[in-house]
Image: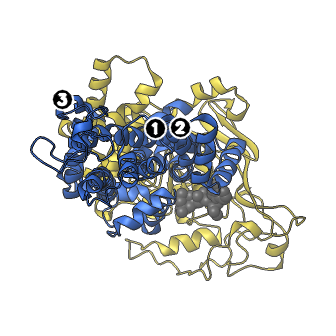
Chain colours: A yellow, B blue
Amino acid sequence: MSDNNTLLRTENLCVWFPVRRALPFGQKRYVKAVDNVSITIKKGETFGLVGESGCGKSTLANTLLGMQKPTDGKVIFKGQDLNALSNKEFKEARRDMQMIFQDPFSSLDPRWDVYRLISEPMYIRGGYTKEQMEAEVLRLLHLVGLNEDDLHRYPSEFSGGQRQRIGIARAISLHPDFLVCDEPVSALDVSVHAQILNLLMELQQELNMTYLFISHNLAVVKDLCKNLCVMYLGQVMEAGDTQTIFHNPLHPYTRSLLSAVLSVNLDEKRERMVLNGDIPIPIDAPRGCRFCTRCPFASARCFQETPQLTPQGENHLVACHFPGIGMEK
Amino acid sequence: MKKNSNNFFLRLWRHPKGRTGIIIAMLLVFCAVFSAYIAPYDPYDVTQRAEKGLAPSLSHPLGTTITTGQDIFSMLIYGTRVSLIVGLVTGICTAFLGALMGLLAGYVGGIVDTLIMRTVDIMLVIPTLPLTIVLTNIFGKSYFMIIFIFTIFGWTGLARVIRSQVLVLKNSNYVKAAELAGASRWHIMFRHILPGVTHLLIMSTALTSAGIMVAEAGLSFLGLGDPTAISWGKMLADAQSGGALLFGHWWWIVAPGIGIFLSVFSFMRIGLALEEMFNPRMKQGAGVRKLFKSLNNTYIQSVFDEMNEDDTPVASSGKEAVQA
Ligand SMILES: Nc1ncnc2c1ncn2[C@@H]1O[C@H](COP(=O)(O)OP(=O)(O)OP(=O)(O)O)[C@@H](O)[C@H]1O
Ligand SMILES: [Mg+2]
C-alpha cells in the first residue's frame, strides 16, 4: 500500500473524546469522532473528504496535522510516524504541513495588520532578514491577488473572501508540501467560492502542493479531487476514485449525499433519496453499521455486524454489507 | 501595533467622556508634579500663628486652617500627590498582579489554575477595611501599607476576568494557526493572548484607581494614612476636628471634597469611556453604582458578563474596529 508516491497515510486512526460520566461508577463513554480511519494521500493530488457536519472531518484533519493526539492508530507523513517523533523532530516534520481554516473571521488575529499576519510564520521560523521578509510578504500578497495597499490594514477591513486570501498567503508562506483546506469556502458568500477555489488550484499547480480538501458539498469536490473519501459518524463509508464514486455510488449514504446535490445535467436521471432524522451523536454510535439507523435498506445484519471497507472494483472501497442495494437498474 | 496604540489614545481623546477625563486627569497630574511651584505657601508650615482661621482672600484663596494657620489652597495642591500616587500605583500593581495570575491560571491551567482560583475565592470573602486597620496597627501607618493591602486584595476580580478571556483566546483559531506555524508558548502568550486582554487591563487600571482614590480619602480620614503627609482625606479629618463646621468655614471642607471628586470623576470618565469604546452597546449605567461595584471587585466581572452575553470577544472587537 505504501509506496514512493504516498505523502501521508493513516493506519486505523481513532480519536475518541471521553465524555463525563453521568454516574460516578458508570461505564466510561466516548465520543468517537474518528474511528478506525485508514486513508492514503498521494503526492501532488487533491484528496477529498466529505461528510455531514459533525462527522469528524475537522478532528481528522487536526490529527493529521498533529494538533490532536490520536487515541489509537498512526499518522505516517513522508514515511515517519508523527506521534513517535521527538518534539524537535515533530516540529521539523510539521513545517511541511499547513492548514486553511474553515472560518476566515476567527483565524486571523484582529489586532494584527496584514503584514504581521502573513509574516508571522516566517518570523517564528526565523532566519529571514527584514528586507527578505518584506519582499516575501509582497510576493505572497500578489500571488493571492491582494496588493501592497492592503499591507497595513487590519482583518476587519476586509471581506470574507479577502480574509481567506490572507489566510492562504499565510499558509503557503513556508512552502508546505501538504495543505489541509478545511471547508475553505463554506463560510464565504457563494459569489466568491469560485474565485477562492480557482486560486487554490492555481497555487497547487505552481507550488506543487498536495491538498486534503474537506467539504460537505459533493459538487465542489467533484471537480477538484481525484480521490474521495466519504465519512459518516467518524468512519469511512466509501472511498476511491471520484469519478467512479459519482457514477457508481455503492453505499446508500453516498447516494443520499449525491441526491442532495442538484444535478446540472438534466438528462441524468437519479433517484431522490432523502434521509430521515438527524445525524446521531457519536457517543452511542450504533453497534453494527454506523448508518443503520437512517438507512432505508437496513436489515437485521446491519444492526449486528459492522461492515468492513471492502474493495468493489479498482480503486473503490465500500463499507456496506449490501453494496449497491436498491439502485435502479 | 504602534499604529494601533496611537489609534487607541486618539479614540479615547475623541470620545466625549474620555476627553473630559483626560483633561482633568492631566490637570491633576500637572498639579501633582509642579505642586512646589503652584502652591503659594508651604503647606507644611504650621508656624503662622498670626494667620489662623482666615477667610478666603486674595492672598489666601481658600483661607487658612483654624488650628495651625496652614494655607488651605497649598494643601489642596499638595494633596493631589497622595491621591494620584496611591490611586495610580495601586491601579497599576493590581492590573499587573491580576494579569499575571489570570494569564497563569488561564494559559497554564491544571493545578496552577486550581490553586489560583481557590486563592481568589478565599480572598474575595476577606473584608479589606478591618484588615487594613489591623495591619496598619501592626506595621505602622503608611501609604505603602494601603497600596500593599489594596493590591493584595484587589487583583482577584481582574484575575477572574482575564482568566476567562484567556481561555477564550487560547482556543481561538488564530492561536491554533500560530501553533501550526510552529509558535512557542511564549510567542502565543505575549503576542496573541496578552494583547487580547490589554484593553481589560487599561480599563481596570482606570477604574481601580478611581475606587482606590475614594478609599484612600476614607482611610486617611479615619487616620490610617501616613500622619505626616498632606492628603485630602486627612484635610477633611482636620477640618472636622478643627471645628470648621462650628465656625462656618465651609471652604475648608469643600476644597478637599472637590479635589476628591475631580480625581475620582476623571478616572471614572476615562474608565467608562474605555468601556464604551470596547463595548459600544453597553448601556450607560449609573456611575455611582459602578464605583461602588469597583470597590467591591465585582464591577469588572459584571462588565465582562454583559459583554459576553450577546457576542463573542472576537466579534465585538471586529465591530469596534468597524466603528473606528
Ligand atoms: N475537543 C473535543 N472534545 C469533545 N468532543 C469533540 C471535540 N472536538 C470535536 N468533538 C466532537 O467530535 C465530533 C466531530 O467534530 P468535528 O469538528 O470533527 O466535525 P466536522 O465534521 O468538522 O463538522 P463541521 O462540518 O461542522 O466542521 C463532534 O460530535 C464534536 O462534538
Ligand atoms: Mg469542521
Whichever of labels 1 and 2 marks the residue nearer the N terminus, that label is: 2
Quarter of the figure with the N terminus of chain A: top right
* Residue assigned mark 1: B227
- The amino acid marked with disc number 3 is Tyr
Chain of the residue under label 1: B
Mark linked to residue B37: 3
Q: CA distance from mark 1 to mark 2?
A: 7 Å
Q: Quadrant of residue B46?
A: top left
Q: Position of residue A188 (x, y in %)?
A: 35, 60
Same chain for mark 2 and mark 3? The answer is: yes
The residue at 32%/58% (across/down) is: B272
Residue A59 visible within the image? yes
* Residue assigned mark 2: B141
Which residue, as the protein is rendered here, is positioned at the far front? Answer: B50
- The amino acid marked with disc number 2 is Lys
The residue at 57%/50% (across/down) is: B156
Left or right: residue B132 versus residue B181 is right
Whichever of labels 2 and 3 marks the residue nearer the N terminus, that label is: 3
Mark linked to residue A261: none
Same chain for mark 1 and mark 2? The answer is: yes
Residue A56 visible within the image? no
Q: Nearer the viewer, residue A290 or A104?
A: A104
Ligand 2: give its quadrant. Answer: bottom right
Q: Secondary structure at mark 1?
A: loop
Quarter of the figure with the C terminus of chain A: bottom right
Q: Position of residue B175 (x, y in %)?
A: 49, 43
Q: CA distance from mark 2 to mark 3?
A: 29 Å
Contact flag, marks 1 and 3 (Cβ < 8 Å): no
| Vertical placement of residue B57 versus B319, above or below | above
